[in-house]
Image (tube, grey):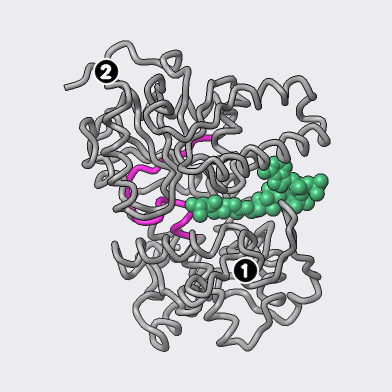
Amino acid sequence: MIKQINMSLSSIKTITVIGSGLMGHGIAQVSSMAGYEVILRDIEQSFLDKAIARIKWSLDKLIEKKKLNQSEADAILKRINPVVDLETSLKNSDLIIEAVPEDMNLKKKLFSEVQKFSKPDAILASNTSTLPITEMSSYTNNPSHFIGIHFFNPPQLMKLVEVIPGGDTSVLITELILDFVKSLGKEPILCRKDVAGFIVNRIFIPLVHEAIYFRERENLTLEEVDSATRHKMGLPMGIFELADYTGIDVVHKATIEMHSRDDRVINPHPNIKKMYDNHLLGQKSGEGFYKYGQENYHRISLSEKDSDKVDIIKLIAVAINNACWLLSNNVCTKEELEKALLLGMGFKQELFKTGESYGFNNIYKILQQLTEQYGRFYQPDKLLNDL
Ligand code: 3HC
């Protein structure tokens, strides 16, 4: 058994981020911005070069917006050390955060390697969007030192970090990681149960599939649905725009995982798998629901007028139903849920306030109709009865 005594935030000085993609490079950047020494590890130098270029772009943006000056940005970059060799990347690290693709076998293999080279009391963490933390921790020698630290894209701008203890994570490590997240200037929300999709993805990923069904059933265009999710549901991006921005590969893998853990969580639309198989991965591959250029950050222009003819209650109903499930299962409180949606997805208005404005009675009826037509995924949660 590894000793846990005397561990406090000051015991974290060096952080290794494994995987330098969309999330990994951002996690490395925010950790360095908070003053930590960071090692960014990937399997090929070219991946690391791309990640460093992205970090430089982001730092330049922050300078442009007067959030940093040039010498601060230079120091941030200097604290990030890109490394290919796994052993070198781990030997001095106090906290190791993996951000590799969402494949349990890949993660299992990685953690068995990580343990060979990491310090015995190092904290191991996963930025998984939905894989079970308890199962992942069982592949390590010390599950009490294993935890989920789930950032949101882009980590540089999104304030939320979900902290997910597994069944064996020690209370001390959970508290330490909550403090660590605060030290990054982020807001941690404790996800009290290791459920599929945690808090935010439990709302977000099913909503992407539902938006495709909604578009087909109501005969709407991409832009109409996107404009309505922005202007009537309070999202900062259209739901299809957001799926492209997140990556269709991420959405697809999260879908498979969530569905395999609990088939009531999500009603997968086959188009997501088709897009994934055809390498239509969104912004990162140049095409997803929309087509993109080479820019680092691309927004879809959506006119508010496009939302005029869209009655979005059916989409709101699905989001509210999943939110109710989280509350009835004590995964988080209502306040935590609203905070998570505000800080993790940029919701401009509280989901339950939106629900209230459409009437919970109407939402309940819509869900009952959808259940009759399309099956038990839509079955209203028991909490909706009370509302
Ligand atoms: N670093 C620094 N600056 C950045 C940046 C980065 N990584 N990415 C974008 N920016 C800049 C842009 O270039 C732009 O600069 P400009 O004004 O010079 O053009 C500025 O930030 C943002 O401008 P916008 O007008 O687009 O501003 P918004 O007010 O819409 O904010 C946003 C952008 C914060 C991304 C907002 O649209 C948002 O919150 N979108 C939703 C994102 C979201 O939901 N993320 C979570 C997805 S789920 C997830 O990640 C979990 C995973 O497990 C699946």
Residue 218 position within the rendered picture, expressed as x and y whole percent measured from the top left = 60, 87
Magenta region: 187-203
What residue is at 49 percent from the left and 49 percent from the top?
Answer: 337
Residue 157 position within the rendered picture, expressed as x and y whole percent measured from the top left = 65, 41
Does the magenta run of residues contain 200? yes
Amino acid type indicated by mark 2: Gln
Q: Secondary structure at mark 2?
A: loop
Q: Quadrant of residue 227?
A: bottom right
Decide which of tag 1 and tag 2 comes sooner along the chain.
2
Residue 94 position within the rendered picture, expressed as x and y whole percent measured from the top left = 40, 22
Q: Is residue 235 left or right of residue 94?
A: right
Residue 264 position within the rendered picture, expressed as x and y whole percent measured from the top left = 33, 69
Does the magenta run of residues contain 15? no
Badge 1 crowding class, 10 Å Cα cut-off, few under 14, some 14 to 19, many 20 or more, is: many
Q: Quadrant of the N terminus?
A: top left
| Residue contact at pointers 1 and 2, CB within 8 angstroms | no
Q: Which residue is mark 1?
A: 240
Instruction: Look at the picture and state if 47 lies above or below 376.
Output: above
Q: Quadrant of residue 240?
A: bottom right
What residue is at 51 percent from the left and 33 percent from the top?
Answer: 40
Q: Which residue is mark 2?
A: 4
Amino acid type indicated by mark 1: Phe
Most foreground residue, 1 or 6: 1
